[in-house]
Image (tube, coloured by chain):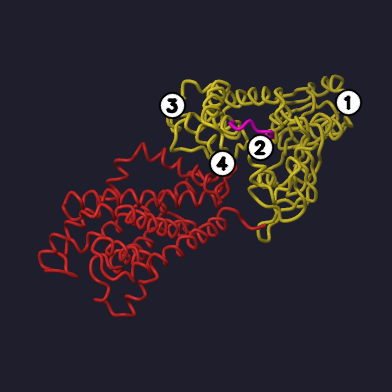
Chain colours: A red, B yellow
Amino acid sequence: MTARLLRATRVWQRNFDVFKRYYVASIVGNIGEPILYLFGIGVGLGALVKEVEGVSYLAFIAPGMLAAASMNAAAFECTFGAYTRMAEQKTWDGMLATPLSLDDIVLGEIMWGATKGTLASFLMLVILILAGLFDKYEEIPLIMLNMFALGASIAAIAICYSAVSRSYEFFNFFFTLFLTPMLLFTGIYFPLDRLPPWFSSFFMIFPTTHSVAINRFLFYGGDALKPIIGSLFLLAFVPIAVMIASRLAKRRLIPAP
Amino acid sequence: MNVVHAESLRRSFGKFTAVDGIDFSIRHGECYGFLGPNGAGKTTTVMMVQGYLPPTDGSLSVFGMDVRNYALEIKAKLGVVSQEGNLDRDLTVMQNLVTYARYFNIPKKTALSRAEELIGFFKLESRKYVQLKTLSGGMLRRLAIARALINNPDLLILDEPTTGLDPQARHMIWRRLLSLKQQGVTMILTTHYMEEAERLCDRVAIMNRGTVLMEGKPAELVKNAMGEEVVEVRVAVEEEKNFQSRVRSLGVKYEQHGETFYLYTQDGKGLMPSVLEMNHSFAVHRRTTLEDLFLHLSGRSLSDL
């Protein structure tokens, strides 16, 4: 296991080296949109909405915006980024000629996607602090852990999707049919009890719903049941999603004998 | 001990059998070539040796280890130059080498000195810190070979190392490979350039449709199948028929590929005068080469040349 983690870290390091060259563009791309939504919707729409669950609308959506930032960054990295390395540039093929296995590469890519997600949500958190929307500094480690788990979940799902995609065009489906609904119906912009129960319980299968609930608990406290269930969900979800991503990548790159 | 040993090795993709039960052994320090037309099964074979594709059937061991169970251990001691360039386009020349070394878990200090050494050996000093898009085809290929050597491999696998290069770049790579060979590096090479195989390989296997047609030292294979000398004559299209009947009357064994005639004989010198008398556009007396053997086989059994 340690050996495997070390090998996966080699892939992570490679992506980090490349990231160091383009980090400004990369960061702007990842958190620019969530920041615009935070203030555009939070301030604009917030003027029309008095309070949600006892806080201002802007404060209500703040914890969810961290999740949105992590999700966005991880999703982009493990679709366009990982797909390019896997299918277009054949970077993975080059790695496969070394003591790295495809499992190591997939794990390394997911770790990297999760790292970018965590970084994006951290920068988002800095903005929340500057805007006076957050001051519970002691909760930062747990929030970041939660954002890493969310990033890893989304990264793994994105790798699964990349492994079955035939071209960049296929990512339109991913973003329209998967990522956008996750932004809208996982409790980021409004409490889920506004939705018909069958609809909101369907979105319980998505990691974002749980991560948003955990963040909101860490921000404002409240009932601990949801965040506990959420943590257990993420703990189970990440390894299973990583395993499926590995399986699908193998099916694509290494035809069965 | 054999570096690679394969018995009844088979690999299929669905219903298509790419490699159909081949046997071969590669000895320490030799350069072994797989020759054959596209689709012969050369690349599939080396991809199995490098632990990328698991075999469908048969046995295959590298450094005495079964490729099915020890892929990572085997890969740690291999260098691979794949046919489709998979250099890391997001990194510079130097970064390509150092990053690759990291995949092998080579300490940074060792990696840096090894990278410097290889950059010198492959004459890439002036391009050390540039992005790959500014490199020529020949430089990219040299970098790919340099990268494959970063871990001081016990076996170097080269899948068509000079395909698509101009003659000068190709000669440059041949010189580097020959010097590696002198240093005792065991090599596997796939190619469809007969000249490349003749210059570099100690032994070759000629493949077609997933099987090995013949195996041995290039010079011996050629000599046994084609004799030692050949007179090659090119004639005008309208002269073909006429020339054919004249050659027949000489009673020598010949082959015709397009408008070129290959006259196989023990005594080329003796034959030349009578050939020169005939109407021709080009005639040369030379030693037989692998290319002749290849053309000979292509007339009979090699597919889609």
The front one of B139 and A185 is A185
- Residue A155 in the image: state x and y as whole percent: 42, 56
Q: Which residue is mark 2?
A: B77
Secondary structure beneath dot 4 equals loop
Q: Amino acid at mark 2?
A: Lys
Judging from the image, mark 2 belongs to the subunit labelled B
Q: Is residue B280 above or below residue A33?
A: above
Q: Is residue A112 visible?
A: yes
B248 left or right of A213 in image: right
Q: Residue sitting at 41 percent across and 63 percent down?
A: A234
Residue at the image point whose x is 88% and y is 23% from the top? B267
At label 3, counting other C-alpha atoms closer than 10 Å, the crowd grade (few under 14, some 14-19, many 20 or more) is few
Mark 4 — residue? B84
Return the residue nearer the eye: A6 or A28. A6
Q: Which residues are magenta?
A: B150-157
Identify the secondary structure beneath mark 1.
loop
Q: Which residue is mark 3?
A: B129
Kind of residue indicated by mark 3: Tyr
User: Element type at marker 2?
Assistant: loop
Mark 2 is surrounded, within 10 Å at the Cα level, by few (under 14), some (14 to 19) or many (20 or more) other residues, namely many
Which residue is tagged 1?
A: B266
Report the label total.
4
State yes or no: discs 4 and 3 in contact (Cβ < 8 Å): no
Q: Would residue B198 appear left or right of B173 to someone viewing this image?
A: right
What is the CA distance from the residue labelled 4 to the residue labelled 1? Answer: 43 Å
